[in-house]
Amino acid sequence: MAERQQHDPQHATDPQLQSPSKDDMISYVMALEAALLPCLPARELQAIDRSPHPSHQIDVERHARDFMEAAKKLQLYFISLQREDQPTKAETLRKEIAAMEEELKVKTELIKKQERLIEGWRA
């Protein structure tokens, strides 16, 4: 599952996920996956080897499928939490506009200062 997520093109190009904490989130999901994997019922996994009954195979497949569905839900939940933490487009634009306005103010003051120097030299 972790390999699929790392190589999934949707995750690679999604700008919402391109943040410093993306690697942290992936590591959390991988750790969770590693922690949950032993929870698969070992007795039923071993039953395949010992039993000729196809129902045992079906039980193991069902448990494995249920486990993978639960892991995927957890993964999507963590990814949605990460997306909630990121600023919206409007917030990002407001910050950029504020930075540009501050830069404009500084440059305007610098221009006025230079104009006064030039006027002083002419006089």
Image: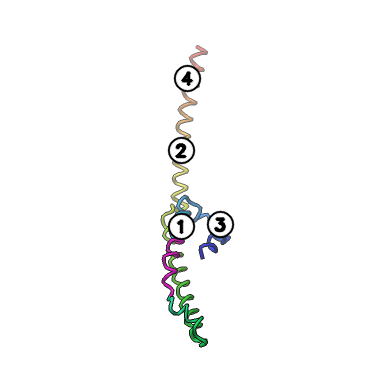
Q: Sequence order check: which comes first, mark 1 or mark 3?
A: 3
> Which residue is denoted by mark 3 in the rendering?
12
Provide residue 33's location: percent of width, then percent of height: 45, 65
> Which is closer to the viewer, label 4 or label 1?
1
> Which residue is denoted by mark 2 in the rendering?
101
Nearest the camera: 77 or 61?
A: 61
Give the SS element for disc 1. Answer: helix
Q: In 3D space, how far apart are the residues under numbered discs 4 and 2 (Cα atoms)?
A: 23 Å
Q: Is residue 43 above or below residue 113?
A: below
Give the SS element for disc 4. Answer: helix
| Mark 1: few/some/many CA within 10 Å (<14, 14-19, 20+) | few
> Which residue is denoted by mark 1 in the rendering?
27
Q: In 3D space, how far apart are the residues under numbered discs 1 and 2 (Cα atoms)?
A: 39 Å
Q: Is residue 99 above or below residue 45?
A: above
Q: In 3D space, how far apart are the residues under numbered discs 4 and 3 (Cα atoms)?
A: 53 Å
Label disc, if present, on residue 116 of the rendered structure: 4
* Boundaries of the magenta span: 29-40
Nearest the camera: 46 or 16?
A: 46
Q: Sequence order check: which comes first, mark 1 or mark 2?
A: 1
Provide residue 75's location: percent of width, then percent of height: 45, 64
Q: Amino acid at mark 1?
A: Ser
Q: Sequence order check: which comes first, mark 3 or mark 2?
A: 3
